[in-house]
Amino acid sequence: MDYEDKTLKCRDCGRDFTFTAGEQAFYSEKGFENEPARCPECRASKKRERNFGGRGPRQLHEVVCDECGSSTQVPFVPREGRPVYCRDCFDKMNSRASAK
C-alpha cells in the first residue's frame, strides 16, 4: 500500500504536525488502527509524565558508603542512624544474606 504524508492537528497543543508515510507504514505494520492524536513533542511530554508520575526525574543524594567509604548517590534521603551502601557493597550484602 502506498502512503502519503498527512497533516494532522495535535489535540493537546492544537499545532499541525506531519504524519509521514513512513510512520503510517509503521503503524500499519504494528496493527495500529488509529492515527496519532498528539504531535511528537506532546507525545514525548506525555510519555515523560507517565514515566515519572508527573514528579519529574528522580533526585539523587550524595552520600558516603558505610561499608567501603566511597562516595555514591542514592535515590532517597538517608535517615539518621541508618546505614547507606554503594551499589557494590549493597549487592555483596544481599548476596550474603540470601546465601544464609
Image (cartoon, helix red, strand yellow):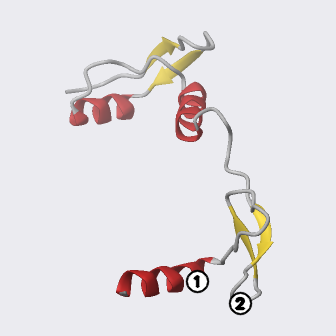
Q: Count every numbered label the image shows and give the total.
A: 2
Q: Nearer the viewer, residue 29 or 94?
A: 94
In the rendered image, which quarter is residue 89 located in? bottom right
Amino acid marked by disc 1: Asp
Residue farthest front in this picture: 81
Quarter where residue 82 is shown: bottom right
> With respect to residue 84, does 43 lie above or below?
above
Left-right relation of 70 to 30? right
Figure check: 54 above or below 15 = below
Q: Residue at x 30, y 25 (%)?
A: 3
Residue 28 is situated, as x and y percent measured from the top left of the image, at 24, 29
Q: Please name the residue shown 61% across and 9% down the image.
A: 14
Instruction: Report the residue marked by disc 1.
Output: 88
| Nearer to the camera, 24 or 90 | 90
In the rendered structure, the answer to whether residue 30 lies left or right of residue 62 reads: left
Q: Position of residue 12 (x, y in %)?
A: 58, 14
Q: Residue 83: give x, y in percent of width and height.
A: 70, 74
Residue designated by label 2: 68
Amino acid type, residue under disc 2 in the picture: Cys
Q: Secondary structure at mark 1?
A: helix
